[in-house]
Amino acid sequence: MLHGRPRHDDPSLARAFTAGLPAIQDALKLDAEATYAGDPAATSVDEVILAYPGFYALACYRLAHHLRALASPCFPG
């Protein structure tokens, strides 16, 4: 810990981040299914996950938000 914030090499930060990944995966699965259901041009959920830049952006946002919520030193508070 550095000034009440976890350090980038703090193993508890990695454990906390890893512990949140299943919830992020579940949320992204729902996002992909909703996108597929709402886009008549989409041919499959896999296509949404692999080829839609908006889905990629959402995945990056969800991961960054999780890191920020953990007060990761990657994201200044």
Image (cartoon, rainbow, N blue to C red):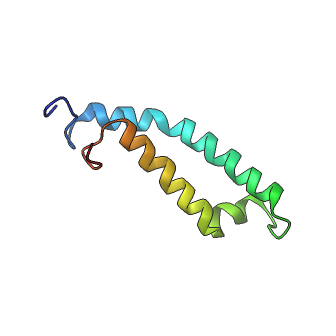
Q: Residue furthest right?
A: 40
Foreground pick, 45 / 38 = 38
- Against 62, residue 46 (above or below) is below
- Against 30, residue 32 (above or below) is below
x 61%, y 60%: residue? 55
Quarter of the view holding residue 13: top left
Quarter of the view holding residue 57: bottom right
Does residue 77 appear left or right of residue 19 in this picture? Answer: left
Q: Which corner quadrant holds the N terminus?
A: top left
- Against 51, residue 75 (above or below) is above
Place of residue 47 in the rendered image (x, y in percent of width and height, measured from the top left): 71, 66
x 39%, y 37%: residue? 69
Count of numbered circles in the view: 0
Place of residue 56 in the rendered image (x, y in percent of width and height, measured from the top left): 56, 62
Q: Residue furthest front?
A: 77
Quarter of the view holding residue 8: top left
Place of residue 18 in the rendered image (x, y in percent of width and height, measured from the top left): 42, 37
Q: Which corner quadrant holds the C terminus?
A: top left
Place of residue 53 in the rendered image (x, y in percent of width and height, measured from the top left): 59, 68
x 65%, y 68%: residue? 52
x 62%, y 48%: residue? 28
Does residue 3 appear left or right of residue 6 in this picture? Answer: left
